[in-house]
Image: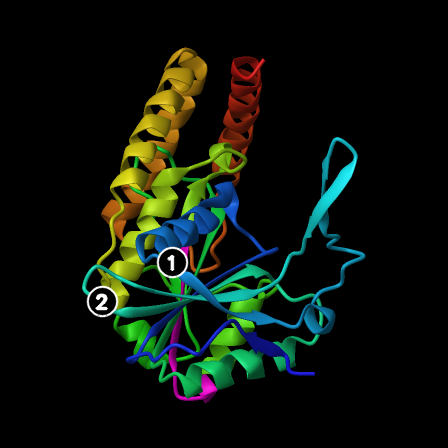
Amino acid sequence: MPALHDVGERPLLDKPILITMLSGWIDASGAANAAIETLKEASNAQLVATFDTDTFIDYRARRPIMELREGLNTRLRWSVPEIHHGADTNGRDILILCGPEPDTAWELFVETVCNYCTDHGVERAFAIGAYPFATPHTRPPQLSCHSPSPHVLAEVPFLKNSVDVPAGMSAVLEHGLTEHGIAALSLWAQVPHYVAALSYPAAAAALVSAVQMVAGLVVDVSELVADAQQQRERIDQLVSANPEHLEMVLQLERMFDEAVKSGQVDPRGQTPASGDAIAAEIERFLREEMGRDNK
């Protein structure tokens, strides 16, 4: 049984860009998922291929969703990795790999994706994600990146950390793509610790903007920018209502500004303990406040 199934006829593509966001790994505030959904909508992306679920998905761990309507089992919704095809405002072809991270057969998954990309003439690939960090919501989200290729890294201005962490599929995939001659780069947005459990459109907008910059794409991000402004105002109101927490945010701002001014970034990608303590306290505060709002 093939590991990948085309949906309809294979599209004729002209050097498409691959953008990947697979759920199941780190995605603070769901920012990367929001970014990939924005890219899918802006590019009018349509489903072109699905992966064999019995090969890659453990459905005892990732059970399908049963839709019941007055006792009628109307349908089952299965989690499955998918490839969508769209185009930016200028007609540039985009392939979007999304859905759940495979549970098994990672090497086969990578081989399958790489072969698909080679068949369609993909020359560059990007993955996106978001992670929590001790940074204030009052400053623009910072981006970090990684790639197996020093040449790819040299072309982008984002933070480049040194740290040992468990890898997601996107990290494994970028090695496979690089071995197939496809330039691969992962982009990560930093999300303030204290909003990591909330939506944070500012990080999603930063990811989309970064993809536009490095891939040369043109897509509309106006809705994300508007959402980011609304969420910023809401968080501002919650924080400013408590002088103690306002001072804590100001301290994070000072830490951020000093780091920018000095050009120093912790090479281990670690957060100062004081920043952790501040962020944890504000996170508890915002959860409590927003919990009251939803009652």
| Residue 144 disc label | 1
> Relative to residue 241, is residue 226 drawn left or right?
left
Question: Which residue is denoted by mark 2 in the rendering?
Answer: 91
Amino acid of disc 2:
Gly
Tell me which residue sits at (56%, 24%) in the image.
Answer: 287
Q: Which of 51 and 201 is in front in this view?
A: 51
Which colour style is shown? rainbow
Magenta-span inclusion, residue 288: no
Which residue is pictured at 47% across the width and 75% down the height?
174
* Secondary structure under the numbered disc 1 in the rendered image: strand
Disc 2 residue crowd, few under 14, some 14–19, many 20+, Cα 10 Å: few
Q: Which amino acid does label 1 sit on?
A: Ser
Say which of 80 and 10 sits in front: 10
Position of 92 relative to 158 (above/below): below
Is 142 left or right of 100, judged from the image as shown? left
Q: How crowded is mark 1: few (under 14 residues within 10 Å), some or many (20 or more)?
A: some
Query: Residue 99: x and y, percent?
Result: 56, 59
- Above/below status of 167 relative to 63: below
Up the image or down, 206 lies above or below 4; here it is above
Q: What element carries label 2?
A: loop
Task: Tell me the magenta residue range.
Answer: 178-188
| Residue 294 locus on image (x, y percent) | 55, 17
Residue 91: image location, x then y, percent: 22, 67
Q: In which quarter of the image is residue 230?
A: top left
**Are the residues at dot 1 and dot 2 in contact (C-beta closer than 8 Å)?**
no
32 or 149, which is in the foreground? 32
